[in-house]
Image (cartoon, rainbow, N blue to C red):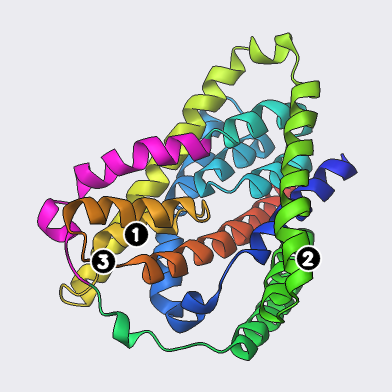
Amino acid sequence: MFSNGLIACLVFMGIGAITDVGYLVAKPFSSMFIAVCAELGTIVVFPIAMLFGLNPGQAASIAMVGGADGPMVLYTSLMLSKDLFVPITIVAYLYLSLTYGGYPFLIKLLVPRRLRAVPMDLSSIPVVKASQKLLFSIVTCTVLCLLFPVAAPLFLSFFVGVAVREAGLRHYVDLISGPVLYGSTFFLGLMLGVLCEASTILNPKILLLFVLGVLALLISGIGGIAGGYVMYFVTRGKYNPVVGIAGVSCVPTTAKVAQKVINETDPYVLVLPYAVGANISGVITTAILAGLYVTIVPLLH
């Protein structure tokens, strides 16, 4: 199980190496607000899963699918639900197809066409220097590791990747974002394939886990869009509600989904910088929730 946790950390480091935290640093409050709203599924599905008979550890692990961040689900299930590690992880890694295929329909259902075309002011986004991003990474990583020591490997891995990127260590960025990221993902898939027996797939609990995982993603998407609407009204119509879907931390999928749906409405509206800021914030808030679950849930047994 130690090797599985190491793989999760290596994947997270690779994500950090391809992540630009500049838009988060430029617009921290709106980005974090959207990200918190987009954790609705991660929070709501926990009690729902317990009502369906899962123990607190299993419920927390499947609820983490609502964050749409594979390493977080992997790490949480390793810590809290080793018996369901394989099926929960398989369900978690279905999120990519679900977000690509399902979220555009959710956006169009909840956000009317005229609001999908709301332009956003890109001139108000300040330029963030590499030194500021590096300082942000160091301070944030230190604070989060002190607050949630049990999840420190996740925070450290992610922000090490970010720090390497912002320090301009090109060869290391290429190494981490290439061989390390894709190699870890490959071995994760290989490991799941080896561990996934026929009895695992045929277990009736798999269907329940799948339904709960999809429900968590759906509720998180609704929560993110609700946060986008709040920002729309707070800014008096200057914030595009579609950006809210990017708070679901599937980097960079949900940010690209938001921009793609908006471009189908108006090809001249650009929201990607705001969406990326919310997306990166979603990664951080998902890691925080993973730390909270791993810390608090063992006390409930």
Tag 2 secondary structure: helix
Q: Amino acid at mark 2?
A: Pro
Tag 1 secondary structure: helix
Task: Verify whether residue 96 appears in magenta.
Answer: yes
Find disc 3 in the rendering and name its residue.
230
Query: Which stretch appears magenta?
Result: 95-119
Q: Nearer the viewer, residue 24 or 221?
A: 24
Q: In the image, residue 197 lies at what x, y percent?
A: 75, 14
Give how far apart the Cα atoms at labels 2 and 3 are: 33 Å
Left or right of 163, for residue 100:
left
Q: Which dot marks residue 149?
A: 2
Find disc 1 in the rendering and name its residue.
244
Left or right of 224, for residue 165:
right
Q: Is residue 127 in sight in this rendering?
A: yes
Mark 2 or mark 3: which comes first in sequence? Answer: 2
Give how far apart the Cα atoms at labels 1 and 2 are: 29 Å
Residue shown at 44% from the left, 35% from the top: 98
Height in image: 188 above or below 271?
above
Residue shown at 27% from the left, 39% from the top: 105
Label 1 or label 2, whichever lies nearer to me, is: 1
